[in-house]
Image: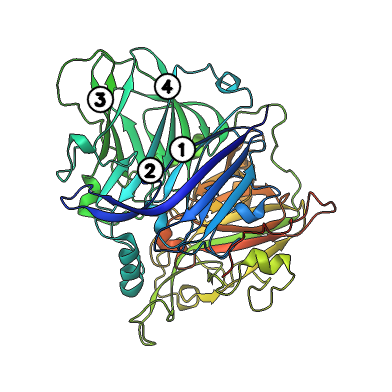
Amino acid sequence: QAAVVEHTFNVGNLSISLCNKTARIITAVNGQLPGPTIEAREGDTVVVHLINTSPYNMTIHWHGIFQRGTPWADGPDMVTQCPVQPGANYTYRFNVIGQEGTLWWHAHISFLRATVYGALILRPRGGAKGYPFPKPHGEKTVILAEWWNDNIYDLERKAFREASTLRPADAYTINGKPGDSYNCSDANQTYKFQVRHNEKYLLRIINAALNTPLFFKVANHSFTVVGADASYTTPYETDVVVIAPGQTVDALMVASATVGRYYMAVSPYDSANLPNPTFSETNGTAVVEYVGYTGDEQPQLPPRTEYNDTDTAFRFLSNLTALVLPGKPTVPLSIDTRMFVTVGLGVSDCQPEQLQCNRSTTHFSASMNNASFVLPSTVSMLQAHYRNKSAGVYTRDFPDRPPVIFDYTSNVSDNGTMQYTTKSTKVKTLCYNETVEMVLQNTHLIAKESHPMHLHGFNFFVLAQGFGNYNETTATPQFNLVNPQERNTIAVPTGGWAVIRFVANNPGMWFMHCHFDAHLSIGLAMVFEVKDGPTEEASVPPPPEDLPHC
Ligand code: C2O
């Protein structure tokens, strides 16, 4: 029985003191950090009334939801909608079709998702008994994020002016709390999970951090991963979960340790391996406490994963495979369009938002195939597409290949041609049901990093990934065409590549971008324009009446 799950999201100021002594004002939904959890079942309709009482323009994105037939509800600022201005409202309406597992929602404008985020839990139509694994005794939502003591809006402005990058967070948080291993916080700022001895829990883990992939552990406990990005996986045993911004992991954990208290810990994975003194120490923590424990011993931290441990990250991220279930989409075997796309950092000329920019200084920029993406300012791209008026808003010339072929993974910081990006609003136009293979190749022009690339509107299959320059001859035999993992966000290995495939069965304008806000804001993005199909259901519907105007 399909239901309508209805929420009101009042976005406004919240005064909070976390990890410092004085309160500061953040932007939050319904006065909560994290914001409210949305729980729905496959087949349900979700309706969220956004009321913007904050001083900032706002949009909300339902990260990982396909939005089939509801492209106006996707949420990225200026891609599918103009922002909801202070004092204005907008209602997001979408259906949950063929998706189960953990997703999340977040603000999709400036850096406001730092504090505007929450969980989106999708259960099978029949509830928890429909899981393809034995029903756990309980479920726990674990949202990992970053926290800054400064106002996030100021921090973003400052980053743009000075270096187009954001300094590391002051703390990592679990369910909004940094935990007592930071000397700025205490037991009141430590999230506590209660478990019963020998019971099994489904942990729904979300990385909501702005810029940092994370390692996640619980002392004296291990996990069986059963899902990622709301797609079931073959059960995978591990004692560390690796999760890039945008990704989710569903993992079973049995409370099989001695009755006691244990730290759950989250620490950064810095794929660029930039020496940062805080990375080797910082731990966001929560406490897992067994029911019936009466002692007061200080819990132990789990053994630390080094902040630059790329081996561990790659092992986890590349070993996952899909649980093949009847009726689930399978990887397309014939390909209509092949793309080879570089992703990485570069430099650029001035941007209007860089207040102290002058023509003699260069600034960081980021690009895909050397095109550094700029959002339009007068009308959203989906509106322009719907009205057939792309002129002056976007151009259909996103290249299938980089303009120059070079050694992508060597540190060619003097490679002027490729370093110097062009600012543009380019889209790749696809026909309805076209199948696409995309090789994502990281570059090392400024820094070598693992970029978490997120595609709106679709899941894609991850066929293979590796280090170095992509080599078709040696990579093709490694393609997993049997049970490749299905994702909405792929952490392209640092100094490496990944091959993904998807079917363009969803008409609309779909953002693809690095899920580091520090990179998205300087252009590491592009948009797929998917044309209407032959039927009304396979066409972009008229916009809702309350769609905000610019
Ligand atoms: Cu989770 Cu375009 O974002």
Q: What amino acid is labelled 4 in the image? A: Tyr
Label 4: state its secondary structure: strand
Point out residue 120 in the picture as x, y percentages from the top left corner. 51, 39
Q: Are marks 3 and 4 in contact (CB under 8 Å)?
A: no
Judge the density around disc 3: few (<14), some (14-19), many (≥20) Cα neighbours within 10 Å: many
**Among the two numbered marks 4 and 2 on one chain, the one whose residue lies closer to the N terminus:** 2
Residue 493 lies left or right of residue 258; in this view the side is right
Which residue lies at the image location 36% right of the left edge and 87% below the top edge? 360
Residue named by callout 3: 262
Residue 321 vertical placement versus 422 (above, below): above
Mark linked to residue 201: 4
Judge the density around disc 1: few (<14), some (14-19), many (≥20) Cα neighbours within 10 Å: some
Q: Are marks 2 and 3 in contact (CB under 8 Å)?
A: no
Pair 1/4: label in front: 1
Point out residue 323 in the picture as x, y percentages from the top left corner. 60, 28
**Among the two numbered marks 2 and 3 on one chain, the one whose residue lies closer to the N terminus:** 2
- Residue 380 in sight from this viewpoint: yes
Pair 2/3: label in front: 2
Residue named by callout 2: 34
Q: Label 2, label 3: how many angstroms apart (C-alpha)?
A: 23 Å
**Among the two numbered marks 3 and 4 on one chain, the one whose residue lies closer to the N terminus:** 4
Mark linked to residue 37: 1
Quarter of the image where the N terminus is located:
top right
**Among the two numbered marks 3 and 1 on one chain, the one whose residue lies closer to the N terminus:** 1
Mark linked to residue 88: none
**Mark 3 CB near ligand 1 (8 Å cut):** no
Residue 24 vertical placement versus 181 (above, below): below
Pair 3/1: label in front: 1
Q: What amino acid is labelled 1 in the image? A: Thr
Residue 57 lies left or right of residue 154; in this view the side is right
The quadrant where residue 327 appears: top right
